[in-house]
Amino acid sequence: MNSKTRLDKLLGSLGYCSRKEVAELLRDGIITHTENLPLKSDTKVSHEHILFEGEPLDPPVGIVILMHKPVGYVCSHDDGEGRLVYDLLPERWRRRDPKISTVGRLDKDTSGLLLLTDDGALLHRLTSPKHHVPKCYEATLDRPLKGDEEAIFASGTLMLNGEKSPCLPAKLTVIDDTHARLEITEGRYHQVRRMFAAVGNHVVSLHRSSFGDLTLGDLKAGGYRVIKYF
C-alpha cells in the first residue's frame, strides 16, 4: 500500500509549484483527483491519484533518468558554467527536492550515456570506487595507435600524471588505427583522455556508449528517458 503525503508537500517536492500556490491552483481546477475527490492543500494523497492539468504527475522521489548527453553541455548545477545538462529536462525538474544530480560526470566535450537521479543512495552506490561499474567509451584519436596500448591498459600498472596509484586494468578494443573502444571500471577525473595521453596520444572526440548493462539504444543526442534501475 502506497504511503500518503500532504498535497502541497508532494507538489512542491516535484517542482510543480510552491506549497503556497497549491490552494490557488486547486481553485482554478489545475490540480485534480483521479476519482474527483475533494482536495485541500493539506489533504494527504497518494502520488498516483493526483493529476496536474489533467496529466499524471512526474515520477516520485527515486527517479532515474538515462540521457544522451550532447557535446557542449556541462554536468553542473552552476548556470555560470554554460549550458547545463539539466536544461535538457523539464524546467520543473530543476526545482525538485531532493535535487536531481548526475551520476558522475561527462566533461563538456564528451557525449553519450549519462545517468541522473535524486536517489542519494543509488548515486553513491554507482559512483563508489568499491563497486567497479564498467563504463565503455568510444574514442577517436589524433595519432595512430602504436600497438602496445592494449597490453599497457590491461596491466593495471599505468600511472596517470598526478595520481598516487595506478589505474585498474582496463580493456581496450582496437577498431582501426585511430579509433578504439575502452572499458574502464573507475571514474577518475578525465580518466580516458589522461590514459591515452599517458601513452603519447590525444583524444579528439569521446563518446560513452554504455554504463553497466545500460546502453543508449536509439536515443538521440539531447534525448532522455526515465528508467527503472535496480
Image: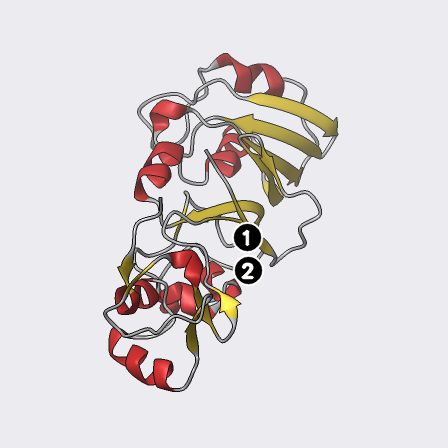
Q: Where, quadrant-wise, is the C terminus in this rendering?
A: top left
Residue at 56%, 27% (x, y): give it.
Answer: 183
Is tag 2's residue or tag 1's residue first in the polypeptide sequence? 2
- The residue that appears at 51% across and 46% down in the rendered structure is 114
- Residue that numbered label 2 is attached to: 72
Give the x, y percent position of residue 168: 44, 20
Label 1 sits on residue: 109
Which quadrant is the N terminus positioned in?
top left
Residue at 39 percent of width and 65 percent of height: 94
The image quadrant that residue 142 belongs to is top right
Horizontal placement of 93 versus 218: left or right?
left
> At label 2, which amino acid type do we have?
Gly
Q: Residue at left 67%, top 31%?
A: 180
Colour scheme in the image? secondary structure
Nearer to us in this view, 44 or 179: 44
Q: Is residue 99 visible?
A: yes
Q: How many marks?
A: 2
Asked which secondary structure carries label 1, the reply is loop
* Mark 1 crowdedness (10 Å alpha carbons): few <14, some 14-19, many ≥20: some
Q: Is residue 116 above or below residue 123?
A: below
Q: Amino acid at mark 1?
A: Asp
Q: Nearer the viewer, residue 24 or 131?
A: 24
| Contact, mark 2 vs mark 1 (Cβ under 8 Å) | yes
Q: Which mark is residue 75?
A: none
Give the side of residue 29 with respect to residue 208, left or right. left
Rendered image quadrant of residue 45: bottom left
Within 10 Å of disc 2 (Cα), the crowding (few <14, some 14-19, many 20+) is some
Q: Which quadrant of the view contains residue 113?
A: top right
Q: Return the x and y of residue 18 as percentages of the image width and height.
A: 29, 75
